[in-house]
Amino acid sequence: MGFRMLIAEDLKKYFGDVKAVDDVSFEIGDGEIVSLVGSNGAGKTTLVNLISGYLMPDTGKITFGDSDITYASAYKRIKVGVGRSFQGASLFETATVLDNVRTALFSRYGKIKRGLLPADRYADIRNEALEILNIFNISDKNNLSPKDLSEGDMKVLDVAIAFALKSKLLLLDEPTSGVATADKFKVMDTIVSAIRKENISTLIIEHDMDIVTDYSDRVLVMHEGKIIAEGKPNEIMESKDVLTTLFGIGD
């Protein structure tokens, strides 16, 4: 696999009798795009919450690059390069698209001390923000409010903000949920093109198997808190056990 950006070892997270994450181990290589699939309640979101620092594991270890981040705060993980987008895009709705990205850049460069600084004082940051919006094909919408965007463009903007923080690992929670079927591949083309260009390691929670098949290097299948299969997309889609578990197909 070469350099391993993320190593999760023997992770467990129980909520009472519910084994949400039950002895899970996996790796993500440098620049690799991995999809995490499974039925509702399989433990996918809990696993991503452990990696991003929103939850702490009961046992196990998480290594990011050369650092043990098992019990690091969510803020510290963002600072070292673990970025996350959410199923519901978390945007500043009263700010413009451009200002949403500029705010991320201000944070990255340590220029936010007490509230938002006058953005126009920083032409270099404005130019960088516009360049990022251009990478994600939404620079023509820079003066709009996020609420004026389509669902697909809101998803793209959410990932662009994580991108602006110079994330080395992106955790994407259903980036096409709520997006019209006709637009979902356009959204993924935009996101994955930027990810590939910057060689960013990525873990995607996704239920749409067309998206998983077209954009993943590798797939992890989760069921009842455990990783029950992993492999290339075509291998996963040809597995009768996986198809039975995910879709009830087969004997």
Image: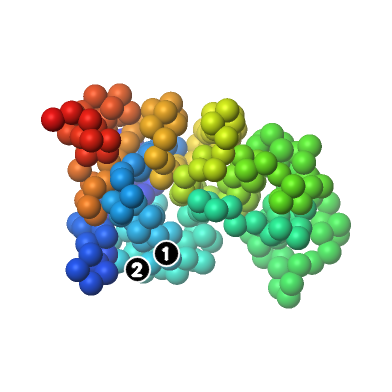
The tag on residue 147 is none
The residue tagged with tag 2: helix, strand or loop?
loop
Which residue is painted at 35% across and 59% down in the image?
46
Front position in the image: 2 or 195:
195
Across and down, in percent, residue 188 comes to 54, 33
Residue, disc 2: 56
Front position in the image: 122 or 251:
251
Front position in the image: 4 or 58:
58
Which residue is painted at 51% across and 66% down in the image?
75
- Give the side of residue 144 with respect to residue 36, left or right: right
- Give the side of residue 128 with respect to residue 170, left or right: right
Type of the residue with mark 2? Met
Across and down, in percent, residue 153 comes to 65, 41
Taking the image as drawn, is residue 66 in sight?
no
Q: How is the image coloured?
A: rainbow
The residue tagged with tag 1: helix, strand or loop?
loop
Which residue is painted at 22% across and 39% down in the image?
245
Across and down, in percent, residue 189 comes to 56, 29
Quarter-of-image position of residue 141: top right
Residue, disc 1: 53
Taking the image as drawn, is residue 91 in sight?
yes
Q: Are marks 1 and 2 in contact (CB under 8 Å)?
A: yes
Type of the residue with mark 1? Gly
Quarter-of-image position of residue 131: top right
Q: Is 236 located above or below residue 29 in the figure? A: above
Which residue is painted at 34% across and 42% down in the image?
37
